[in-house]
Image (spheres, grey):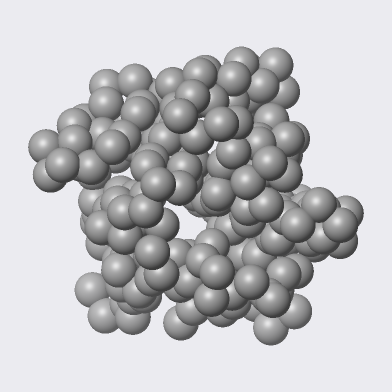
Amino acid sequence: MDFSGKLVVITGVGRAGQVGEAVALGFAQRGAILALLDMQQAEVDARADVLRAAGHVVSAHTANLSNATAAKTVADEVLAAHSDCAGAVHALVHVAGGFGATGPLDISDPEAWHKQFMINLDTAYGATRAFLPALRVGRGSLVFFGSVAALPSGSPKGIAAYAAAKSGVLTLMRAVAEEEHVNGVRANAVAPTQIRTAANMSSMKADTEYVERDSVADVVAFLASASARNITGQVITLA
């Protein structure tokens, strides 16, 4: 899985100890040129600085990807920063999102419900729409983050908004896989259980079984690689 000279865009690479950090490191170690996106400038700059110090080529950008205009603006900014890639993006990995328990539907907060769709589904749509032209040039791939809660075997109890938003992400993934196949663009998703992130470890039970961040990074890199050239429209469960 050699990504030397290939531009990989990763969203949601902000706070230390989260999965985006591990995904970015995994691609960097495989030679990728990275464009990291997040909402917070200081945090994405910090993640980029660590990778640059290790000799990797990285740019850092901020945008509210739930806003289609802002997403298009940052896509143009990324391509300008990496003009030597000739307008081609090899992979877009959409890690951006967030978990929120909204409780039983009859007492759920409508604002909390809509927030889950904004941070998970709207950002996925905005990033996809903005980077599709460059992905077509690069005949690249997209990797989305779903959730086991959004699968038929999962339970949406108490987290219906999050599960519904992630179901929308998986539907978006399948739409891209079908619509963009003719353009040489693939789309897949991972659906992890609890990942061993700093946030999860501080909020979950001590005996929680975790998926390691490095394992997630390895699967994402595989799906974005030439080794997965015949895989599209699939959801890979990680447990």
Q: Quadrant of residue 64?
A: top right
| Residue displayed at 46% across by 29% down | 84
In this rendered view, identify the residue nearer to me: 123 or 127. Answer: 127
Asked if residue 97 shows in the view, the reply is: no
Q: Which quarter of the rendering shows the N terminus?
A: bottom left
Asked if residue 13 shows in the view, the reply is: yes
| Residue displayed at 75% across by 79% down | 152
Residue 191 point in image, percent of width and height? 57, 70
| Residue displayed at 23% across by 73% down | 206
Residue 163 point in image, percent of width and height? 67, 60
Residue 216 point in image, percent of width and height? 40, 68
Determine whether, in the image, residue 66 is placed left or right of residue 84.
Answer: right
| Residue displayed at 55% across by 69% down | 226
Residue 2 point in image, percent of width and height? 38, 64
Q: Quadrant of residue 46?
A: top left
In this rendered view, identify the residue nearer to me: 75 or 207. Answer: 75
Determine whether, in the image, residue 117 is placed left or right of residue 31.
Answer: right
In this rendered view, identify the residue nearer to me: 159 or 236. Answer: 236
**Vertical relation: 104 (above or below) 129:** below
Determine whether, in the image, residue 160 is placed left or right of residue 86.
Answer: right
**Vertical relation: 50 (above or below) 82:** below
